[in-house]
Amino acid sequence: MVNQVIVVTEPERQDNLEIVIMWYLTIASTVFVYWLGLFMSDNSTPKNHLDSWLVLLIAPWFWPIVVPMSIWELVGKAAKKQDLSQESF
């Protein structure tokens, strides 16, 4: 087994950081636009409620935590719904 040392120069490191930041901001923007659409189409939430707007503005910045938790919750609800529909047969 040969040990190889990978040398990353400062310009490469800067380029990698820029790519990571670009992807992070792209996904955060996508999450914000998607959630804004859901928020605007939701009739149960008043559009002049300040707390709702604060959550809508802050949550996309935490998408690496929020999105997997949301998916986990949706999968759990779908599984529960499927279990309930199978019991009715």
Image (spheres, rainbow, N blue to C red):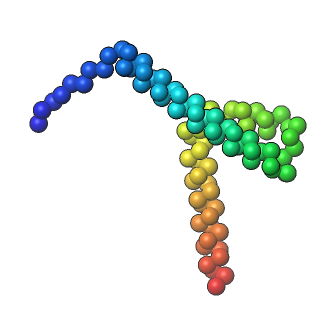
In the image: residue 85, left or right of residue 55? left
The answer to which quarter of the image holds residue 25 is top right
* In this view, 51 is above or below 18: below
Nearer to us in this view, 22 or 52 = 22
In the image: residue 33, left or right of residue 48? left
* In this view, 68 is above or below 15: below
Q: Identify the residue shown where x is 87% and y is 43%.
A: 46
Viewport quadrant of the C terminus: bottom right
* In this view, 39 is above or below 87: above
Q: Identify the residue shown where x is 59% and y is 66%.
A: 79
Q: Is residue 40 visible?
A: yes
Q: Identify the residue shown where x is 74% and y is 44%.
A: 37
Nearer to us in this view, 30 or 53 = 30
Q: Identify the residue shown where x is 84% and y is 46%.
A: 45
Viewport quadrant of the N terminus: top left
In the image: residue 9, left or right of residue 31? left
Q: Position of residue 40 (x, y in %)?
A: 80, 44
The answer to which quarter of the image holds residue 16 is top left
Q: Position of residue 38 (x, y in %)?
A: 74, 47
